[in-house]
Image (tube, rainbow, N blue to C red):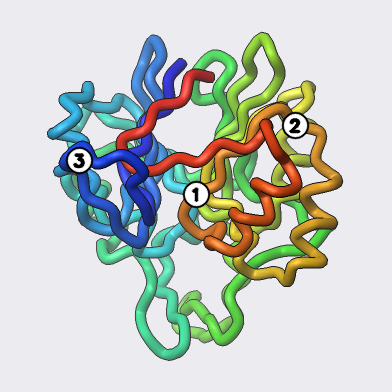
Amino acid sequence: MKVTILSDNKILVPRGYKAEWGFSVLIEGKETILFDTGSGVVFENFASMQKPMPSVIVLSHGHYDHTSGIRHFLQRKIKLYTHPDTFLPRFFEGRFVGIPYQKEFISTSVEIFEQREPVEIKKNVWVLGEIPRVYETAFLKDSFLIREGKKEIDEVKDDQAIAIKTERGITLILGCCHSGLRNTLKWAEEVVGDEVKEIIGGTHLISYDEKKIIEILKSLKIDLIVPMHCTGLKAEMIIEKIMGENYRAAGVGDEIEV
């Protein structure tokens, strides 16, 4: 399989694509899976790369920087997997940060599969569902959502990831990892029944101080980490220092074989 980065905060090699505060990757195998849809430049990058249309879309959670580009991919034949909380109105520091489309609008164009539990959407490809939290988490302070007309603290319980079982072990693809890196890794291994060997995507290590970041990284027994989006520049520099040759920098347009 091949993972192509369609949306990220950075571009390492100029190729005519656009960066943004957002995240999206295309997973190409026998079928094509779009994981998250960025803020706004995804389809433009996607078209420039001349990639095949996905048959499946997975949303990691309901924040705008992972969902806003979905309108460009709404087709009858596409299946959408996401947690039911994805469509709830969400706010951070008083401003709206949720998905900018209502569920009713999206459901007129794609078949929506709401799931809290893990689902094997393709052979050896799992959407992990709601992730049990044992270790530290990375939800945003001063954030809330509206559920049935009532305001509640938003712990981003809809945060999920994709786990791909390969010959080398599990490749874990993260959207924003609000559930926490160690929690997500542990859950992926329980669901798939193998060890995580590669991590690609948003780790949300930006939420922690240097001591905690180092603690988390030293607990990992992996062969590759490709941090993006909400990892943060400071955390990425720490990752490079701690993980050494197991670290790889990436940005929009880069491709990773898994």
Q: Quadrant of residue 13?
A: top left
Q: Which residue is mark 2?
A: 222
Q: Earlier in the sequence, mark 2 or mark 3?
A: 3
Residue displayed at 39% across by 50% down: 23
Dot 2 lies on which element? loop
Q: CA distance from mark 2 to mark 3?
A: 30 Å
Q: Is residue 218 left or right of residue 209?
A: right
Instruction: Inspect the image, locate mark 2, and give the three-letter code of the amino acid beneath it.
Output: Ile
Instruction: Determine whether label 1 and label 3 are within 8 Å by CB.
Output: no
Instruction: Inspect the image, locate mark 1, and give the three-letter code of the amino acid beneath it.
Output: Met
Q: Earlier in the sequence, mark 1 or mark 3?
A: 3
Q: Which residue is mark 1?
A: 228
Residue displayed at 61% across by 55% down: 237
Dot 1 lies on which element? strand
Q: Is residue 171 left or right of residue 19?
A: right
x and y percentages locating residue 163 in the rendered image: 61, 30
Q: Which residue is mark 3?
A: 45
Instruction: Determine whether label 1 and label 2 are within 8 Å by CB.
Output: no
Q: Quadrant of residue 88?
A: bottom left
Few, some or many C-alpha atoms within 10 Å of disc 3 (few <14, some 14-19, many ≥20)?
many
Q: CA distance from mark 1 to mark 2?
A: 17 Å
Q: Is residue 168 left or right of residue 86?
A: right
Q: Is residue 138 left or right of residue 112?
A: right
x and y percentages locating residue 254 in the rendered image: 37, 32
Instruction: Inspect the image, locate mark 3, and give the three-letter code of the amino acid beneath it.
Output: Asn
Q: Is residue 150 above or below residue 234?
A: below
